[in-house]
Image (cartoon, rainbow, N blue to C red):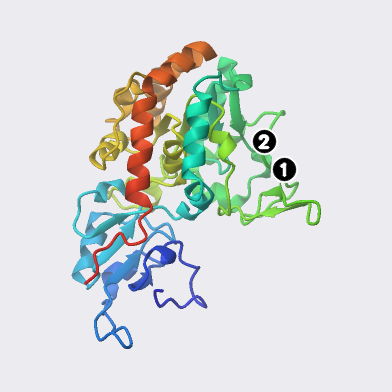
């Protein structure tokens, strides 16, 4: 495995996929600018190990300039979650929660058979909307769903905003949004899809999960120890946002751009669930460059908002473009889903092919 000093950094989320390489976990973007990366020699083999920079364990926002600097300073390969790096030399697209999907990857054929079987039956709900960490656009989406009167038609998770810590508020809201985010709170919150909320939670553990009769309900590591696949198998589409929609400018200087993907993108694709994602410009365009397609009837709305820059106008366009989906009956959604299934299936196969290789790098 890669040589990593875990006394000083988190456990790498990608180490298991890069045997025989020198893995360097970058804790700060400055690491790519300021450090020189040197290969070492594998004992007994007499050859150098290629250097892999892990920029996903600490969820770094690596733009094109930082990426190029890392290569110039000696990196052989760079692992990021930035869609704008697709096609760049020596790039590996990855997400720091991919390990959540080991349960799925060990049962690919089972899930394939289960989804095909489900095509015969109506699904339990029309849509899925899962908000664990608050982001302002997720509050806007939830508020829109509530005022449209469709909450009972969805698989929904939404916290009570009074319980959100100051650290999270400072991390995910602009100064303007901090002044008004509580306007989106409601007395009936939280709505919990599959986990029990803690009355007082920390950033590391907001929920409890049932671990069996011996342990009963215990805290869940909120960074993502596992996921519930049933949330993605019982509706016809998911509406969501990626992590840095309004707040990217808070972390990047003028002119710098990233387009991060995460498990929020991976999970619906793996489960053949159409997803409508509010995020940076050209998200679907870049995913198509990576080999996915979004041209079947159910995805007709994405091309109305994908080319827009992130912001309040895009949020309005996003909701308007997708509104027709919330007006359809389950039968109508079922017909639309089945007619789009072949594309959804092909996207799943593309994802499995590109993201599960144990040796995605050619050995030197």
Q: Residue at x 33, y 56 (%)?
A: 80
How far across and down, in percent of the image, does residue 170 sit? 53, 50
Position of residue 171 relative to residue 33, above or below, is above
Q: Quadrant of residue 19?
A: bottom left
- Depth check: give the residue in front, 280 or 94: 94
* Dots 2, 1 in contact, CB < 8 A: yes
Would residue 265 be visible to someone looking at this image? Answer: yes
Q: Residues within 10 Å of mark 1 (few under 14, many from 20)?
A: some
How far across and down, in percent of the image, does residue 61 sit? 36, 55
Quadrant of the snapshot with the N terminus: bottom left
How far across and down, in percent of the image, does residue 37 sit? 27, 76
Mark 2: secondary structure: loop
Q: Residue at x 26, y 47 (%)?
A: 84
Q: On the image, numbered disc 2 is attached to which residue?
A: 192
Q: On the image, numbered disc 1 is attached to which residue?
A: 196
Mark 1: secondary structure: strand
Left or right for 208, reference 299: right
């Amino acid at each position: 495995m890669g040589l990593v000093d875990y006394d000083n950094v988190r456990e790498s989320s990608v180490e298991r996929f890069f045997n025989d390489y020198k893995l360097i976990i970058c804790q700060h973007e400055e690491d790519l600018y300021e450090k020189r990366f040197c290969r070492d020699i594998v004992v007994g083999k007499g050859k150098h190990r290629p250097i892999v920079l892990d920029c996903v364990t600490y969820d770094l926002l690596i733009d094109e300039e930082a990426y190029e600097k890392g290569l110039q300073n000696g990196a052989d390969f760079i692992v990021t979650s930035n869609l704008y790096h697709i096609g760049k030399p020596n790039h590996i697209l990855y997400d720091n929660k991919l390990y959540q999907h080991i349960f799925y990857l060990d049962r690919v054929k089972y899930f394939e058979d289960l989804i095909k079987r489900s095509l015969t039956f109506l699904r339990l709900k029309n849509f899925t909307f899962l908000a664990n960490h608050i982001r302002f656009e997720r509050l806007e989406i939830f508020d829109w769903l509530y005022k449209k009167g469709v909450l009972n038609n969805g698989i929904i998770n939404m916290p009570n905003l009074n319980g959100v810590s100051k650290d999270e508020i400072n991390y995910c809201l602009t100064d303007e949004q901090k002044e008004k985010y509580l306007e989106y709170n409601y007395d009936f919150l939280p709505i919990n899809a599959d986990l029990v909320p803690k009355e007082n939670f920390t950033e590391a553990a907001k929920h409890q999960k049932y671990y069996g009769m011996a342990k009963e309900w215990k805290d869940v590591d909120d960074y993502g120890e596992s996921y519930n696949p049933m949330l993605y198998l019982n509706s016809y589409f998911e509406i969501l946002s990626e992590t840095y929609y309004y707040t990217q400018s808070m972390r990047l200087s003028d002119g710098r751009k990233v387009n991060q993907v995460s498990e929020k993108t991976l999970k619906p694709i793996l489960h053949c669930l159409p997803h409508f994602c509010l995020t940076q410009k050209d998200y679907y365009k870049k995913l198509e460059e990576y080999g996915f397609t979004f041209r079947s009837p159910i995805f007709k709305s994405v091309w109305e908002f994908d080319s827009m820059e992130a912001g309040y106008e895009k949020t309005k366009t996003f909701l308007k473009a997708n509104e027709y989906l919330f007006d359809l009956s389950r039968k109508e959604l079922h017909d639309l889903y089945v007619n789009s299934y072949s594309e959804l299936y092909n996207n799943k196969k593309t994802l499995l092919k590109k993201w599960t290789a144990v040796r995605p790098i050619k050995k030197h």
